[in-house]
Amino acid sequence: MASKLLTLVALVIALCASPITAQTSTLPNGVAAGDTDQTSVVLWARSEHTGAVVFELATDATFAAVSTTLTAEVSDPLIPVKVDVTGLTAGTTYFYRATDAAGVIGNGTFRTLHVPGAHTGLRFGVSGDWRGDIAPFPSIANADERDLDFFVLHGDTIYADYPSPAVRAGQATTLTEFRLKHAEVYAEHLGLNTLADLRAATNVYVMIDDHEVTNNFAGGAAPQTHRRFAGANVEYINDAPLFETGLQVFQEYNPIRDEFYGETGDPRTANERRLYRYRTFGSDAALFLIDARSFRDLELPDIDDLAPEALAAFEQAAFDPTRTMLGAAQFADLQADLLAAQAAGITWKFVMVPEPIQNIGVIEAADRYEGYAAERTALLRFIAENNLTNVVFVAADIHSTFVNDLFYREAAGGEQIPVASWEITTGSVAFDAPLGPTVIDIAADQNLITEQQRALFTVLPLPARDTLLRAFIDGRLAAEGYDPIGLEGGLIDVELLRGSYLVAHTFGWTEFEIDEVTQALTVTTYGIPAYTHAEMQSDSATILARQPSIYSQFIVQPHS
């Protein structure tokens, strides 16, 4: 009784505090379809009424001939329901509807994946990083209209460690608090619900980064290494109650199957939750979804000293060959699946890694693959030595778009060895502040620019800010021996069509489109000027009127 009372109180507090508009639907977070492959899908809904939710599936939008009917039971209005549908036909468009106990219907659609063997063309989207306190999310308002084959929700799908109207505390800790945080981001705010619209319009693949639990944790480290987990009587953070609670609710609120590793021989991964996924889309593309958080070793201490000896010490520590970001089992899965995709004649291989793999510099690098340099080198060397073609890394986390070639070193301070692969970071959907002003603030705080230069920067047009920011970042990259931002002059056959290889002052998402005939890949980043919580509260009409437009677009020809 006490737990039910606490849940009711939390719901009342959230509804009183939140700007979420009054709901006429008892399906406040819409419906979703995900974890899709050639013959199966997970369908999802959350109803505010207890009782049965009936899922129906058909190949026509009128549901004249329902092919599948499955039922799930709602026992708690805060806990969504899911059904696993199997026996589907590859390469087929399906329509589904969920009818709850109140008779409210939510409709959605998805496509099963084509089997390898033919080129059919592909279009998909990616973004990550959205905070409930700056909802709604007009930056992705056009995504549901783009006829996408799928969308990757690329981590930081909630910010459990940021206060928001749904949970005022600075860190969610209970099942109820985590559920309220997820319900908040998929709810309607000010008459807009772009995330629910998107999830109903296509397949989604959903990943964690860190804020689904708490910032910058290492799942393979001991609990006492992070203040949020200290005191947990387990060997690794990925068995601590806070981690388990966050991951349970992440699974509940997304259309994902529960999968687990078996006996891997590594206590960090044995019998743990398996979020890694490998999917193929005809012969056009393969998708690799990476869990870069659950099994990683303790991160190195971040440095803010840019003296050469400090840089060298960080890089030397990062090249410790015993340290891992992915864990041995997941790293082996990724290698095997990359080889399988190449052997199957699949053109493009998209590796979705939450934190960037490109070298951006040592400031706050401990959380990125740059802080796990030995494993980073092992992965990029594997791609090069096995002649794996058209491998593209897609990351989020840094709240901006960076595009760059990839290089690796065999040892700290060694020469940069190029790989015929590249990376793009994307997003955020909404994180205040985006990377541009954040970098400028750090530069001013470290006396790398003057206060006058910082003030001047803030009044420039967005393209001019990106141009100056790129020059500043390129200078820092050169000082550390890294490649400047962009794909010009490298191993990639690319043409920049619009904008720049850096977009750092917007909220938005990125679309990837593979031409059915030529297999050329067009990459388009949509966005709106970034806004703050205060701006949304004081002038929401102006913010909501912003329409996503193209800030960057380029086309890459595949290597044969």
Image (spheres, rainbow, N blue to C red):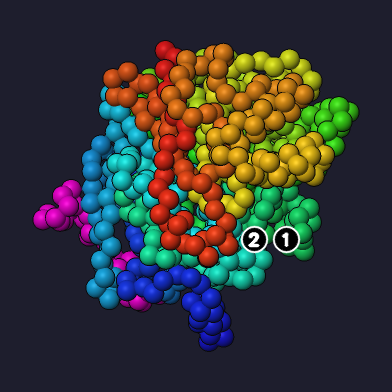
The dot on residue 228 is 1
Residue at left 67%, top 53%? 215
Under circle 1, the secondary element is loop
What amino acid is at disc 1?
A: Arg
Looking at the image, residue 219 sits to the left or right of residue 18; the answer is right
Name the quadrant containing residue 405.
top right
Residue 96 or 481: which is nearer the viewer? 481
Residue 303 or 66: which is nearer the viewer? 303
Residue 328 horizontal/vertical position (percent): 63, 36
Residue at left 76%, top 25%? 480
Q: CA distance from mark 1 to mark 2?
A: 10 Å
Between label 1 and label 2, give the one nearer the viewer.
2
Q: Is residue 66 visible?
A: yes
What span is colored magenta in the figure? 48-75
Mark 1 or 2 closer to N-term?
2
Residue 336 horizontal/vertical position (percent): 51, 28
Q: Is residue 252 visible?
A: no
Residue 106, placed above or below residue 450: below
Q: Which residue is mark 2?
A: 161
Q: Is residue 60 located in the magenta-colored stretch of the structure? A: yes
